[in-house]
């Protein structure tokens, strides 16, 4: 009780503080909080960036390259009630038995109800390095591999090499989400710097930047992607290909942002505060980046949030076409590529589990972006 | 104090500023001469569009495109060194400087400050009052706070970067000096949280934070109501006395200028038409334009039934087709046909420090 009372006295705002009107960002935050959908989008994104980008090793039950004998196995059922009708508080999976139909050469899997493998949380498994430097072998959930080497848990089935599909989706999310974020940061950088310069200097600088923008945006996107992606040498290391792809994606997309920033700067640069700052001795770069650019931020944040899904989709599309990230790197695009044959859809439909993840991420970004757009104009309505 | 000593600070000589626009060339400033003395106030009055603000911006080398300084010089007597024995001045020709260069940026704000007409929009909306002041201070790398009797410390501190706490203290101190209540709270206020008068005070604080040798005040009180106007003018006078700063006070309000300036220049269509000491100008205006301006001030106790306030007849001429001869002749009540529309009047001395450009006072 004492604690509750203490917090109460602390949270009572002093009358002095109340007199000061609220700052812009606190109004924005206040309005954003009231938009449930946007907050949900934000939470979803935060959660997905943590699981997919920061700690997929911990969440996934296996290592990315962990292969098993269970190739193209359907998702294993997670049970609470065993064959005898007995309830188990700890969920379990049955052992699986592989059968080969000698006529059709098709593999089928049958649950062996005699073998019960309980699922443990925080269980020892494949070794990995958390955040790239902390050696660990704990996984969020899984079956005890030491005690039962035959046991597997395949939440979303497995692929042709017997790799856990859920694990692959988690790891694939890392590259796909990062490419969206890094690509968008690069786009923002190019778009803002060139847009500000274009609007501020005008004249020849403006002409060159605007005509370049027009030239790039006049070329259809997919062929341009294809040409640029094809220009990446085959022998390059996979990570270099990945970063090249990020740069290509942002190279094609900075133009739109640059235009919008330019338009805003054209009106902002006539404001008297620019003249005032100049008469106080501010240099051109100071005027551009300290006095003009912040005025465009609220707009840029919204544009950027709404553009990241486009980046993620572009990566997915390119990789699906085989032009972006290539195996052995795993991204959502390469996973879709695996699932994109008629044979895969017929035999291993669980490989389509990638799709809801992509959809959810993009939906979350749009929800967040829409909420931000409403919130960043707190004086509206 | 060297108050009796009249030293020139800015000398504008035959300045011409022209705008080359599609419809022709507009002469915003046309052969202007004026001198601003150290520690003195020069008032510049005239109608809208007569070139007052362009003159001010020419001094800071900030003529907007497509304007250009096509002729003339602006000499700035820059104080390089000031010690107990004497001052060493370096004459800088401001029009010859690179408008984006380092020297002019040191002069802007650091040595010649400027405040503007619109306090509502003269502060960058994303920065607090304190940030604005600190920006001005950090741009010129000096600590501006001169504590009385602390001359030695001042010399040591000049050209030294300041820490965050010091910068905040400077901001608070400047706000206190311009009379903002609760400066330690207001230093963290954003422009939209301040009233118009407070914003103009912040502007003055910014301009004064580097203790400039001259302050250009471009209609600083036009957007403010009368009581705030009086306070702002008081602050400017007090601060001028304390730091011996020259002021170029641009306005179209004759009442304000009478209380602020020692000397007044009257401008019409980019030209100076009359210059005199303030008392002399109000008592004995020579130029018909100045006389007309003075007549148009409403006076208390002189109201006559049915009479209207005197105004200057006619319209300001089209800047693309300026009248020949004296530019004021189409509106002039003393128009002399055959003379005023043919001959351009010269800058003539008509008394002690009293100059006028009118054919009435010229032997033609």
Image (cartoon, rainbow, N blue to C red):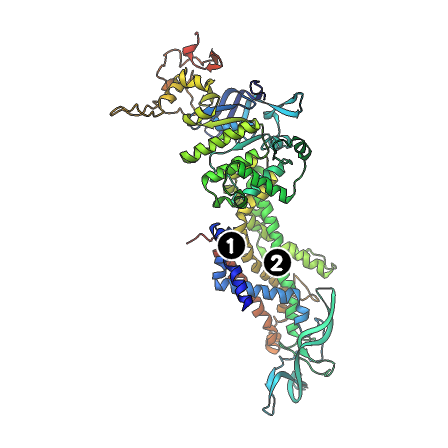
Tell me the residue that label 2 is attached to.
Answer: A181
- In the displayed image of the protein, which residue is found farthest to the bottom? A84
Q: What's the distance in space between the residues labelled 2 and 1, CA to CA? A: 25 Å
Is disc 1 surrounded by few (<14), some (14 to 19) or many (20+) residues within 10 Å? few
Q: Secondary structure at mark 1?
A: helix
Horizontal and vertical percent for residue B220? Answer: 47, 32
Tell me the residue that label 1 is attached to.
Answer: A26
Looking at the rendered structure, whether the residues under marks 2 and 1 are on a common chain is answered as yes
Say whether residue A290 is visible.
yes
Q: Residue at x 59, y 72 (%)?
A: A352
Q: What quarter of the picture does the C terminus of chain A occupy? A: bottom left
Q: Residue at x 38, y 21 (%)?
A: B294
- In the displayed image of the protein, which residue is found farthest to the left? B305
**Rendered position, A161 above or below A130:** below
Of labels 2 and 1, earlier in sequence is: 1
Q: Residue at x 30, y 24 (%)?
A: B301
Horizontal and vertical percent for residue B22? Answer: 47, 30
**Quarter of the rendering containing residue B337:** top left
Q: Nearer the viewer, residue A153 or B38?
A: B38
Q: What quarter of the picture does the N terminus of chain A occupy? A: bottom right
In the rendered structure, the answer to whether residue A161 lies left or right of residue A379 reads right
Q: Nearer the viewer, residue A172 or A343?
A: A172
């Amino acid at each position: 009780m004492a604690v509750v009372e203490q917090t109460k006295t602390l949270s009572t705002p002093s009358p002095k503080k109340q007199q000061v009107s609220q700052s812009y960002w606190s109004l924005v935050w206040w309005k954003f909080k009231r938009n449930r959908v946007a907050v949900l989008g934000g939470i979803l994104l935060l959660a997905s960036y943590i699981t997919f980008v920061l700690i997929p090793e911990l969440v996934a039950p296996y290592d990315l390259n962990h292969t098993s004998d269970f190739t193209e196995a359907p998702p294993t059922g997670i049970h609470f009630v065993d064959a005898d009708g007995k309830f188990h508080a700890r969920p379990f999976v049955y052992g699986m038995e592989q059968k080969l139909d000698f006529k059709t050469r098709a593999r089928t899997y049958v649950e062996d109800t005699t073998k019960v493998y309980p699922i443990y949380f925080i269980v020892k498994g494949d070794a990995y390095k958390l955040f790239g430097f902390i050696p660990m072998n704990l996984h969020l959930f899984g079956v005890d591999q030491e005690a039962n080497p035959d046991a597997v848990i395949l939440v979303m089935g497995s692929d042709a090499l017997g790799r856990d599909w859920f694990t692959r989706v988690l790891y694939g999310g890392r590259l796909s989400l990062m490419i969206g974020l890094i690509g968008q940061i690069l786009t923002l950088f190019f778009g803002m710097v060139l847009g500000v310069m274009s609007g501020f200097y005008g004249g020849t600088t403006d002409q060159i930047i605007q005509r370049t923008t027009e030239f790039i945006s006049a070329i259809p996107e997919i062929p341009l992607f294809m040409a640029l992606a094809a220009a990446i040498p085959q022998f390059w290391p996979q990570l270099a290909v990945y970063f090249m792809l990020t740069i290509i994606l942002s190279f094609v997309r900075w133009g739109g942002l640059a235009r919008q920033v330019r338009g805003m700067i054209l009106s902002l640069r006539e404001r008297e505060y620019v003249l005032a700052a100049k008469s106080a001795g501010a240099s051109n770069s100071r005027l551009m980046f300290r006095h003009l650019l912040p005025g465009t931020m609220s707009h840029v944040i919204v544009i950027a949030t709404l553009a990241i899904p486009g980046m993620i989709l572009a990566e997915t599309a390119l990789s699906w076409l085989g032009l972006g990230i290539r195996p052995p790197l795993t991204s959502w695009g390469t996973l879709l590529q695996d699932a994109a044959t008629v044979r895969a859809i017929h035999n291993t439909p669980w490989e389509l589990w990638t799709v809801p993840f992509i959809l959810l991420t993009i939906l979350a970004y749009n929800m967040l972006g829409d909420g931000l757009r409403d919130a960043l104009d707190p004086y509206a309505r | 104090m060297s108050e009796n000593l009249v030293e020139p600070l800015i000398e504008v000589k035959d300045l011409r500023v022209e705008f080359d626009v599609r419809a022709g060339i507009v002469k915003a400033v046309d052969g202007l001469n004026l001198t601003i003395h150290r520690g003195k106030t020069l008032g510049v009055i005239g109608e809208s569009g007569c070139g007052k603000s362009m003159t001010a911006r020419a001094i800071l080398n900030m003529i907007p495109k497509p304007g250009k300084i096509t002729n003339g010089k602006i000499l700035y007597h820059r104080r390089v060194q000031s010690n107990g024995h004497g001052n060493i001045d370096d004459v800088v020709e401001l029009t010859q400087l690179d408008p984006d260069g380092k020297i002019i940026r040191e002069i802007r704000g650091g040595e010649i400050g400027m405040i503007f007409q619109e306090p509502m929009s003269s502060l960058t909306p994303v920065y607090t009052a304190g940030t604005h002041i600190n920006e001005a201070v950090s741009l010129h790398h000096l600590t501006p706070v001169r504590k009385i009797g602390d001359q030695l410390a001042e010399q040591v501190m000049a050209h030294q970067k300041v820490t965050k706490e010091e910068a905040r203290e400077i901001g608070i101190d400047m706000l206190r000096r311009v009379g903002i209540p609760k400066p330690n709270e207001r230093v963290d206020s954003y422009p939209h949280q301040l009233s118009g008068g407070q914003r103009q005070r912040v502007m003055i604080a910014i301009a004064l934070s580097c203790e400039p040798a001259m302050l250009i005040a471009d209609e600083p009180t036009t957007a403010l109501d009368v009581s705030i106007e009086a306070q702002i003018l008081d602050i400017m006078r007090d601060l001028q006395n304390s730091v011996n700063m020259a002021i170029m006070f641009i306005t179209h309000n004759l009442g304000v200028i009478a209380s602020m300036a020692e000397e007044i220049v009257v401008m019409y269509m980019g030209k100076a038409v009359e210059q005199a000491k303030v008392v002399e100008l109000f008592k004995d205006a020579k130029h018909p334009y100045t006389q007309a301006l003075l007549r148009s001030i409403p006076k208390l106790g002189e109201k006559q039934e049915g009479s209207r306030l005197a105004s200057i007849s006619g319209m300001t001429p089209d800047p693309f087709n300026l009248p020949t001869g004296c530019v004021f002749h189409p509106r002039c009540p003393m128009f002399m046909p055959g003379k005023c529309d043919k001959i351009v009047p010269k800058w003539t001395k008509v008394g002690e420090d009293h100059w006028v450009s009118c054919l009435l006072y010229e032997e033609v």
